[in-house]
Every structure is written in C-alpha cells, then in structure tokens.
Amino acid sequence: MNELATNEISFEDALQKLETLVRELESGRIKLDDAVAAYEQATVLKKFCEEKLKAAQLKIEKLEVSPEGELKTVPLDPKEE
C-alpha cells in the first residue's frame, strides 16, 4: 500500500487492515516474503492512522463560557495555548 492508496481509504478501514495484518504477523503462519510485505504495508497504515489522529486532535476544541456569559472556543489541551 502506498501513499496514494492511503489517500483513498478511511481511518476506520485503515485501522481494520492494520489490525488484520498485525494478527497475521503475530500468528507466524505466513511465509517470510509475505510477512515482509505485510510489515511494510502495516508500517504505511500505522503512519497514516497516526497522521489522521493528529490532524483530528488539532481540530478538537472545547467551548468555554466566560464570566460575562460569552462563549468562546479554546484548545482542548491547555498546553496548546
């Protein structure tokens, strides 16, 4: 799976494929060449999933009400301020 292919897949589908690949690798029942290919594909999927999660985290904000009753958005993580 290359970068182009990951652009056409949802996070949920990528995560499911990653979990399947990990189970196959952990089983030890696949040939060495197939295991290497699966590992390479899993690495691409892992990176894709991490990037999607990071992008989603950056978009998450929470609403706060000021003492004056005004609503404003602030980063969910106070360290980001």
Image: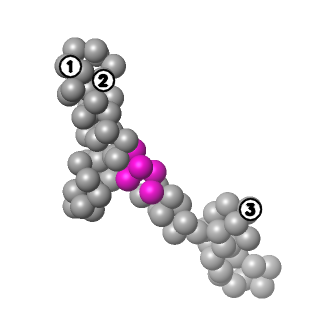
SS at mark 2 in the image: helix
Q: Percent from the top left, x then y, of residue 21? A: 27, 32
* Residue 35 visible at all: yes
Residue reaching furthest to the front: 33
- Name the quarter where the C terminus is drawn: bottom right
Picture quadrant where residue 61 is located = bottom right
Left/right of residue 5 with respect to residue 25 in the rendered view = left
Separation of residues labelled 1 and 2 (CA atoms) = 7 Å
Residue beneath the point at 28% across and 41% down: 41
SS at mark 3 in the image: helix
Q: Main secondary structure of the magenta part?
A: helix
Write the start and end of the magenta stretch as one range: 46-51
Q: Is residue 47 on the magenta stretch?
A: yes
Q: Label 1, on which residue?
A: 30
- Closer to the observer: label 3 or label 1? 1
Q: Residues within 10 Å of mark 3 (few under 14, many from 20)?
A: few
Q: Label 2, on which residue?
A: 25
Chain-order first, disc 3 or disc 1: 1
